[in-house]
Image (cartoon, rainbow, N blue to C red):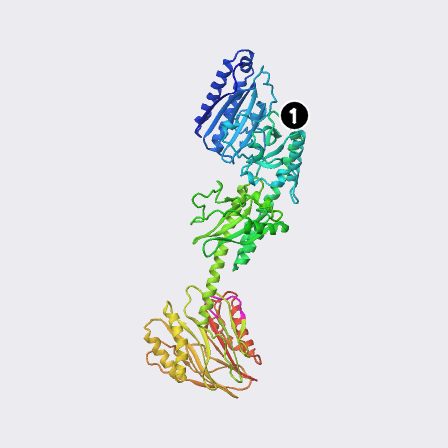
Amino acid sequence: MKGRKDLVASAAYLPEPAAVAAARKFVRDTLCSWLDAGPGPAPAAAADGGLVDDAVLLTSELVTNAVVHAGTQVQVTCKLAAGAVEVVVRDSHPARMVPSPAPDDTVPAERTGGRGLLLPSALAAAWGVSYGTDAKAVWFRMGVPGSPAGAPGTASGPEALDTVVPAGPWNVATAHASTLPPASVTGSSAPGDSGYEALLGHCVASARAIASADSAYALVADEDGDLGVRAASGLSPAAWLRTAPSVSTVPFMLDGRVTGVLAVAAARPGQFADGDVQRLQKLADEMGPALERARLAELERARRARIGVLAEASALLAGPLDQDRVLAVAGRVAVPRLAAWCAVLLAGPGGDLRLTVARHADESQAGALSWLLNLGCDRSPPHIGPDGGPAPGARADHAGSARSWPLAAVVPPDAPAGVADLAARGAWCFPLTTQDGPLGLLILGGPHGGRPSREVQGLAEDLAGRIALALENSRLTAQHRQASEALRATLVPHELPRVPGVELAFAHDLPGTGLTGTRLPSAGLPSAGLLRAGLLRADAGGGDFCDVFPVAEGRWRFAVGEGCGAGPATPAVTSLARNGLRILAAAGLSIPAVLDRLNQLILDERAPGTFLTLVHGEIAAGAPARILLACAGQPLPLVLRGQGPPESTAAPQPVLGVIEGQGFTAQQVTLGSGDLLLCVTDGVTRRRDGDRLLDDDDGLARLLAACTGLTADVVADKVHEEVRTFGGHPAVDGMAVLVIRAAA
């Protein structure tokens, strides 16, 4: 081999089964041509010692792994230099590592796969893995027997790696170099780190001291089985990989399988001797079992903590919630079980994303997180496509719709404490999407290694879907409430007038409600109205209405009614009735004349199946109070006097809008001190509990009989509450209640 220096040969293959055989032939032919061409005992010794066969076997294993697990083009490079053979297998999928064998047993000898990194560990003098932003290189070195520099144990990094893998910046983790947290680089465990983190930090610090290295790091498997940097000491990996350092790696072994890699690096070539490698291996052998136990315990704790995340989210997000409550629930569920921190960005009116909530497991970091997300980010979060997926050009993770967000590349020196660590780990974004399009993003803080596990990603995607649904429901609820309030404003008076010597109170529900409401007193008046907060059904008609308004000195008109029918004509009839009552009263028409004219107006609308039920009357203030009223199709009003049961008053008459030329009459009722008149729509009397109605066996009269001596607003409240709770289910029909009571 004299006269030959740094022989290098490379070949590239497509990711197909035939690539393995072709790579074996390439390595065998290349090494045989190099070794057979050299004089002296080295070639013969290499052949006798099986160096070529071992190199071919290792190449076959590594290329098979690259084809099966990476699925990208594979490049194989052979090098003969300094009395050693070096082979590098490169693929373009840095996020995948050569898998280790099944954890339950060692690999049987008859199996042709599943050996992972056992073969390089057993046959090569040195081996290692290097990661780049878009590539990964697995290499091994074997000394040529009989060559001065070919003794086993020469474990420096591959000098030819720069010719095989594109120039840096490189990082041995599966994410960008900036995602390695400074706390890990120093080798110290931050407050709150797990026992596993502390143990790894101690291990890499010890390795650096033992080998007098510039840097040390530990490559261990994450939840998905991919190897990545979990702890480092000294210079960051990006810093020393760019300087083409000397690297020595030893495996963590447990029960014959590789569980990780312990590595040291130095800027000076040839830094590490055989003794250094042996001491590193002894450290790895001593620490390996404890590290694996701690890793499995940490993984079990994390998975136990995640149990019930979606069930809790479903329970908390069930029912009507406003946006602030939905976002608070999102933070409570996600932190700390899915990530150390989370945030929600929602699209504003112009489509720009705005921070709406941020939560950190460590409350002392809340300020740093808010500063970073509001002021410190020097780039925008990933754009949301129209379907909620990644927009063209956005980088999505291969496991789902999650996309990385690097946050800040450079943290200013005046940033709050903790910002640098948060920015270094980056974040991952999960779209909040509904059928109508994207709403925003759920952001999870990046973990060690730069990428959430597939389990966490799956939970986060499901949680994001539930949050988006809850936000959409909250938005629709708010819109429906706004529509309901707008409709209610057309169905009830803004406030009740003051009538001398008379108390007035009303209660009202829109169709399709059944929710509890609040009392809204008329400002400065002794009477009150009870408005029930609820949502209007999509198929609701005109709704029950109530009105009280002055018509002349000492006289007031009142109305309680309901537009009935189906389709858009029904709300029109309700609006016609409420406005027509005021206009006709202002024209000086009597109660019967108003009903006559209103009946004809509805008939003129020519809307078949549409009609109006109404109680209409006039109050003349005084002692006693005199009331003139007519009832057309509604339940008969009830009078409750100081003594005796309630009595029906007024004569029943046909509904309005059905019979041409129908005449109407009015009856007079006198209310003495403490007497009370109750007018209701049929939404009260027809409230159903199975086959029973509320007014069966004079149920409304019996309810009113228990109200003797009560004020008007208390009576309205009691009637409404009875209707709401009767039957134990939400009411479908609307209702209107008007109570008129002569002052005691």
Of the 4 image quadrants, the one containing the C terminus is bottom right
In the rendered view, tell whether residue 54 sits above or below residue 251: above
Q: Amino acid at mark 1?
A: Gln
Dominant SS of magenta comes to loop
Magenta span includes 207: no
In the figure, is residue 608 to the left or right of 540?
left
Quarter of the rendering containing residue 518 = bottom right
Quarter of the rendering containing residue 427 = top right
* Residue 261 image point, x, y percent: 60, 31
In the rendered view, tell whether residue 702 sits above or below residue 183: below
From this viewpoint, is residue 516 visible? yes
In the figure, is residue 145 to the left or right of 690?
right
Quarter of the rendering containing residue 411 = top right
* Residue 246 image point, x, y percent: 59, 27
User: Foreground: 727 or 443?
Assistant: 443
Q: Which residue is mark 1?
A: 278
* Residue 568 image point, x, y percent: 37, 67
Q: Which residues are magenta?
A: 509-518
Q: Residue at x 47, y 27 (%)?
A: 75
* Residue 509 image point, x, y percent: 48, 70
In the rendered view, tell whether residue 607 sits above or below residue 9: below
In the rendered view, tell whether residue 435 sits above or below residue 497: above
- Callout 1: helix, strand or loop? helix
User: Foreground: 191 or 551?
Assistant: 191
